[in-house]
Image (tube, rainbow, N blue to C red):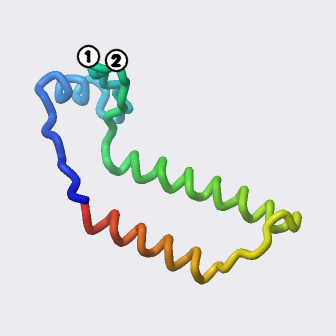
């Protein structure tokens, strides 16, 4: 799947100047859906924090014996495939 990268509007640039660290809510007037605009580095940091939290939940479950039949080699291979696909598309 090919990702398109939309260009910033002048209004978005002004919002980034006013709040350079983001996040900046961006509303779609057609759907009323709100999105978040932020620097890529900030998104990467948030994503990494999310992954670490979710991994900790899994580690805690494993420590309590709540997980079974996991093939960590397969899980890690899938994670690497997904990461590679994501970085190639950026």
Residue under the image location 13 percent in, 29 percent down: 9
Q: Check the picture and name the quadrant holding the C terminus.
A: bottom left
Residue 74 shown left or right of residue 11 in the figure: right
Mark-to-mark CA distance, 1 and 2: 5 Å
The x, y position of residue 13, in whole percent, is 17, 29
The x, y position of residue 87, in whole percent, is 31, 66
- Residue 50 lies, with reference to residue 37, above or below; the image says below
17 and 76: which is toward the camera: 76
- Residue 33 lies, with reference to residue 1, above or below; the image says above
Residues at discs 1 and 2 in contact (Cβ within 8 Å): yes
Residue 40 shown left or right of residue 78 in the figure: left
Q: Label 1: how many residues lie within 10 Å, few (<14), some (14-19) or many (20+)?
A: few
Label 2's element?
loop
Q: Which mark is residue 29?
A: 1
Q: Check the picture and name the quadrant holding the N terminus.
A: bottom left
Label 1's element?
loop
Residue 69 shown left or right of residue 33 in the figure: right
Q: Which mark is residue 32?
A: 2
Residue under the image location 30 percent in, 25 percent down: 26
Residue under the image location 26 percent in, 16 percent down: 29
The x, y position of residue 51, in whole percent, is 56, 57
The x, y position of residue 5, in whole percent, is 18, 47
Residue 36 shown left or right of residue 53 in the figure: left
């Amino acid at each position: 799947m090919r990702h398109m990268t939309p260009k910033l509007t002048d209004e978005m640039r002004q919002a980034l100047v006013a709040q350079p660290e983001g996040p900046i809510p961006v509303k779609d007037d057609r759907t009323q859906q709100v999105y978040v605009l932020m620097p890529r580095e900030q998104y990467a940091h948030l994503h990494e924090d999310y992954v670490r939290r979710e991994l900790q939940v899994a580690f805690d479950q494993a420590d309590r014996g709540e997980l079974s039949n996991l093939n960590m080699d397969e899980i890690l291979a899938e994670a690497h495939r997904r990461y590679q696909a994501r970085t190639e598309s950026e």
